[in-house]
Amino acid sequence: MYRLAVVVALSTSAPAVAQERFDVLIRGGRVLDGTGNPWYRADIGVRDGRIAAMGRLQGAEAGLVIEAGELYVAPGFIDVHSHADEGLDREALKGAVPILLQGVTTAVLNPDGGGPWPLSEQRARYEAHGIGVNAALMIGHGTVRREVMGMEDRPPTEEELERMKSLVREGISAGAFGLSSGLYYAPGSYAATEEVVELAKEVHPAGVYTSHIRDESDYTVGLLAAIEEVIRISKEADIPGIVTHFKALGPDSWGLSVAATQRIERARERGVQIWADQYPYEASGTSIVGALVPRWALAGETMEGQPSPLEARLQDPRERARLRDDMVKNLARRGGASLFQISNHDADSALEGRNLEELAAERNLAPVDLALSLLDVGGAGLVSFNMSEKDIATIMQKDYVMTCSDGGLVAPDEGKPHPRYYGTFPRKIGRYVRERGVIGLAQAIRSMTSLPATIFGLDGRGILREGAVADLVVFDFDTIAERATYADPHQLSEGVVHLLVNGTPAVRDGKPTSALAGEVLRPSKRRM
């Protein structure tokens, strides 16, 4: 009796255990940690922008408690190829609502060799006015080449090459994650492989090399040879190489995804770090210039107050005839005019959403002549239906393939852009996981989170663990879906219920909060 009384006395006099308190507490959801593991139940406590605790956090309190229940909790999605850089510079769009409602918390900007210069100014602008999504900046090879050589179609001199190298080093000092190229586009297409290798070496060892490859069909060198070029650049520069928005473009190239993925796999077996990313659509998005105009027609110096090289060639009957012949061939390579839809045309917005072949027939023109007439008044954006579902599935199933949108950020009254601007990540989960079973949910989430975070060196992101940055998405697997269509693209996705960017709620109960919690990131010092 005496011993029992002592125990009771001690227990009643002991101080109460303090309840743990967080800024945000997500309770009881199905956690997909980003590694590819199956889901498991756990609570997640967020404090000071980081995941402070995970597990069964009984008795914990928070300023915001989210009862996840049967919802899935995953790392915020990472878009490794985004054209949102211009949109994030605009006051009305800096909140990045169409991106956030896809579950994306980080966007890699300045792809395809493009983007502004200098990067230090781009960073400063974003930091000054705030942005809704995290931004990781790339150095555009085409941007650097244009800064030094304009649109000249020739090799650089030794002095010019050294100047380009110094600009790449400047970009790395400004916090760039690597070098992007658009060897399909001008002026990147004017560069030999050796030039790109020398510039890619300047981002070693901290960066990556990502490329809109020189050819995605049989336009110039062929898809397989273009992939081999990325492999060579990656190997010689000793940095990870990425085949970006990986596809087999045009009916004549359908089925080449098998041989193309084999090229990548053989390179990986040899120890070359080659990766890829992909958007889950059967249509690409570009412009008349990008899709149909041969690169020779863009080359040359533009004098102030004078027509551009392309404009001058359009006005020259001989050059116009030569240009027309090449455009006829390029239309055929992409499957013909019936597969093209006009996405934006500043001179006449009534044409937006219309089919190129149908418009040509209405005007009693050959499709190529309609395209030339559009170039005469400033050109037009295009959506081009030129991929096969079998190729999309073949590529998507590979464990080295990340997810990207290749989408921009525009106002809801601007043209009829590709629906990937609004729906990429929900479409992949809704269409290719839930409806078609092309891949499993855990693999899809990995392709959007830990895989890109590892490749790009996004330290503390892309995975759910204690100490990680609290970029978190809570979504409903049964309802997550794109609403954007080719005919009506300006529609926000659904199914993302909650979203945290750096621990700050950016979406609550399916509605954006207007928070500008994004940061302009810098690469991790610890790389692959």
Image: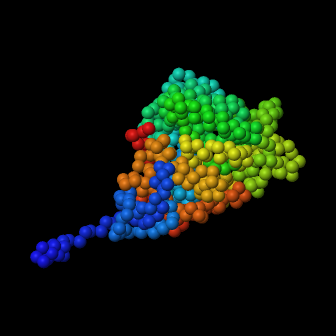
Residue at the image position 78 percent from the left and 34 percent from the top = 326
> Residue 404: x, y in percent?
58, 48
Q: How is the image coloured?
A: rainbow
Q: Residue at x 74, y 54 (%)?
A: 352
Answer left or right for 258 relative to 233.
right
The spot of residue 337 in percent (x, y) is: 80, 45
Out of 478 and 354, give the one closest to the viewer.
478
Q: In which quadrant will I find the N terminus?
A: bottom left
- Quadrant in which the C terminus is drawn: top left
- In the visual, does 496 lie left or right of 371? left
**Nearer to the camera, 504 or 298:** 504
Q: Residue at x 60, y 64 (%)?
A: 479
Residue 247 visible? The answer is yes
Q: Residue at x 60, y 50 (%)?
A: 439
Q: Above or below — where is 157 with respect to 453?
A: above
Does residue 129 appear in the picture of this structure?
no
Above or below for 457 versus 232: below
Residue 155 place in picture, x, y as percent: 60, 24
Q: Determine whether 406 is above or below 310 in the image.
A: below
Residue 523 coordinates in the image, percent (x, y): 43, 42
Q: Quadrant of residue 216?
A: top right
